[in-house]
């Protein structure tokens, strides 16, 4: 192995919680290769023992795969650190909602949780971090563009029925497809978090796009996340996908409050019986597999989907769906208190 190959290996290792690599952040100060031993000197800008361990373990594993011994030493240069921003400090608690893949009703859940928290007497807000499919405005029934305070150089979030919201859909034409690379997505999320004049809130819900890509990492890097909720459907494949999402949150140091089985059952209008379109799994079995608690099983109700499409979810809060959502909101309150 030569120095060039060693640097290539190091450049493929991400800094924990970020999409950039060790070399992108200039963490690697020097690399020396002699015989079958690589000596790596790191300039680590963190005292977090867990992050340091993740980095060391990853370096040892990558070089170990090549059959090469590695010696790691560190130096702390003054002023060198990976910057962590702390936007939306006006919220007492910030909750991220994430699913491993699309089609599991994550955005409907996010809006419904925000409504349930509001109905429990809280001041709430929601941020639509899905830049490619900003559906939150439609679900809230908000069609207006976001306002602006030119003196403060701030964007004014929309407010309807006591819920404050911000979405790319309030800034660009909702009918125009967003054809952006990762860097542009990151920039848009950061600017909407930074330049929105968020009011004081008890709970701030972030609807993340499916998967564990740039948007999720950007939220972690720019906002203190107090808890995360994983949305899945009750079938083995979806749960297996959800496991990767749980692993992502744990790796970047975000507490996973629990998971929700969405569209868990369907209630027959005529007989009142329950059917299980995605299969039936014991929540305890999913808890054991994911290693996080179940917050509830949410039913599939066609009227909920219709209300979400029409921006009228607040008109059907007397349904079993919202009864379950209230229970989930109560559990989240207790977990984050």
Image (spheres, rainbow, N blue to C red):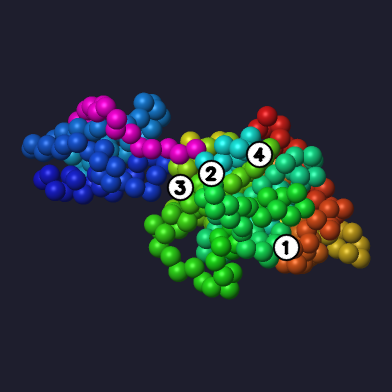
Real-space Cα distance between discs 2 and 3?
14 Å
For marks 4 and 1 on the same chain, the one whose residue lies earlier in the sequence: 1
What's the mark number on residue 141?
Answer: 1
x and y, in percent, of residue 290 in the image: 57, 42
Label 3: how many Cα within 10 Å (few below 14, some 14–19, many 20+): some
Label 1: how many Cα within 10 Å (few below 14, some 14–19, many 20+): some
Quadrant containing the C terminus in the rendered view: top right
The answer to whether marks 1 and 2 mark residues whose Cβ atoms lie closer than 8 Å is no
Secondary structure beneath dot 3 equals helix
For marks 2 and 3 on the same chain, the one whose residue lies earlier in the sequence: 3
Viewer-proximal residue among 67 and 40: 40
x and y, in percent, of residue 118 in the image: 76, 45
Q: Is residue 238 visible?
A: no
Residue, disc 3: 217
The answer to whether marks 1 and 3 mark residues whose Cβ atoms lie closer than 8 Å is no
Residue, disc 2: 246
Q: Is residue 306 above or below residue 151?
A: below
Q: Is residue 134 above or below residue 221?
A: below
Real-space Cα distance between discs 4 and 2?
29 Å
Which residue is pictured at 11% across the width and 45% down the height?
2
The answer to whether marks 3 and 4 mark residues whose Cβ atoms lie closer than 8 Å is no
Residue, disc 4: 200
Quadrant containing the N terminus in the rendered view: top left
């Amino acid at each position: 192995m030569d120095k060039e190959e060693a640097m290539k290996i190091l450049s493929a290792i991400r800094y924990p919680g970020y999409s950039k690599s060790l070399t992108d952040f200039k963490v690697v100060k020097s690399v020396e290769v002699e015989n079958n031993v690589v000596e790596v000197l790191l300039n680590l800008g963190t005292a977090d023992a867990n992050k340091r361990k993740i980095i060391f373990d990853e370096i040892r594993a990558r070089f170990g795969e090549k059959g090469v011994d590695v010696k790691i030493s560190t130096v702390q240069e003054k002023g060198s650190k990976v910057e962590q921003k702390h936007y939306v400090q006006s919220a007492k608690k910030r909750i991220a909602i994430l699913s491993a893949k699309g089609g599991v009703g994550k955005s409907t859940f996010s809006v419904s949780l925000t409504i349930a928290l509001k109905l429990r007497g809280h001041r709430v807000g929601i941020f639509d971090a899905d830049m490619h499919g900003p559906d939150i405005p439609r679900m809230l029934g908000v069609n207006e563009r976001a306002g602006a305070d030119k003196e403060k150089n701030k964007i004014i979030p929309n407010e309807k029925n006591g819920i404050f919201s911000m979405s790319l859909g309030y800034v660009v034409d909702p009918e125009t497809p967003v054809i952006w690379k990762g860097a542009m997505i990151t920039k848009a999320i950061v600017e909407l978090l930074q330049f929105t004049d968020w009011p004081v809130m008890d709970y701030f819900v972030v609807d993340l796009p499916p998967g564990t890509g740039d948007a999720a990492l950007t939220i972690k890097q720019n906002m203190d996340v107090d808890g995360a909720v994983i949305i899945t459907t009750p079938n083995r494949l979806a749960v297996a996908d959800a496991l990767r999402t749980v692993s992502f949150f744990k790796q970047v140091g975000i507490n996973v409050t629990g998971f929700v089985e969405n569209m868990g059952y369907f209630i027959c209008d005529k007989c009142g019986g329950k059917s299980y379109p995605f299969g039936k799994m014991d929540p305890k079995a999913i808890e054991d597999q994911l290693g996080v608690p179940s917050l509830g099983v949410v039913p599939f109700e066609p009227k909920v989907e219709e209300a979400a499409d029409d921006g009228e979810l607040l008109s059907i809060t007397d349904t079993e769906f919202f009864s379950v959502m209230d229970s989930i909101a109560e559990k989240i309150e207790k977990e984050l208190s």
